[in-house]
Amino acid sequence: MRHLVAALLLLTALPAWAAKLYKWVDENGVVHYSDTVPPQAAPRGREELDERGLTVRRIERAPTPEELAAAEAERRRREEAERRAREQAERDRRLLATYSSLADIARARDEALNALEGLIQVAAGTADNLRAQLDRLLRQAAAHERGGEAVPEPLRREIGATRRQIAEHEAFIRAKREEQARLRARFEAEMARFRELAAERDGAGDRAAPRRP
């Protein structure tokens, strides 16, 4: 009550030429009125009053560091969501521009998988030939050892090189199988998205079509 009386007295005592009066609450909950705002009160919220004591403008308090950090996190989250939405819209545009039906997607999937399968079969055939070659080389080495002879160095080198080639072809085949799995997953996702976009397009068309009387 004392603070309210003091404020009313201050308002009545203000000269007619007083341009502005500020009202704010300090950290102890005490209400202050003044024609200037002290530096320690500047970050706090306040009201600007006219000569009749009526609020003409509210000045919000400065945000805390925690609030600033939360606002920055929210801004980044919105920007990331907008970026993802733009990227999805671009992927959808390319999907609809590339394929006209699910059959088109299935055909492209099969062509890509078959191309990889062809590479796999060539590598598998080569690996089989190398294994047969390695078997012959190992038999030759065993014959030298059974005869009490050391395995010739050129033969040892050829055995090592053949084993490395087999390992390389096996690694190639594994990589292509993994690529096939990724392709299947990608095309499956594209087909699912195409169904969604087609349903949305058809639904929009139904809503836009005029109803017959």
Image (cartoon, grey):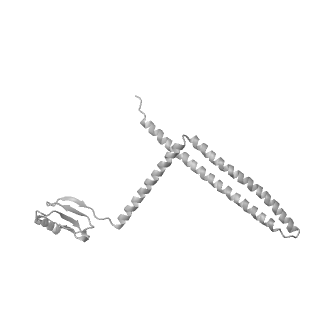
Task: Name the spot of residue 156 as percent of width and height, x first.
Answer: 79, 66
Q: Pick whichever, 165 or 128, lies toward us.
A: 165
- The quarter of the image holding the C terminus is top left
Q: Quadrant of residue 66?
A: bottom left
Task: Name the spot of residue 29 as percent of width and height, x first.
Answer: 24, 68
Q: In the picture provided, is 27 more to the left or to the right than 172? A: left
Q: Quadrant of residue 78?
A: bottom left
Q: In the picture provided, is 1 more to the left or to the right than 92? A: left
Above or below, comparing residue 129 to residue 147 in the picture: above
Res. 198 visible in picture: yes
Residue at image x 60%, y 51%? 183
Task: Name the spot of residue 115 as percent of width and height, x first.
Answer: 65, 48
Above or below, comparing residue 88 to residue 203 in the picture: below
Residue at image x 48%, y 48%? 90
Residue at image x 44%, y 56%? 80
Task: Name the spot of residue 116 as percent of width and height, x first.
Answer: 65, 50
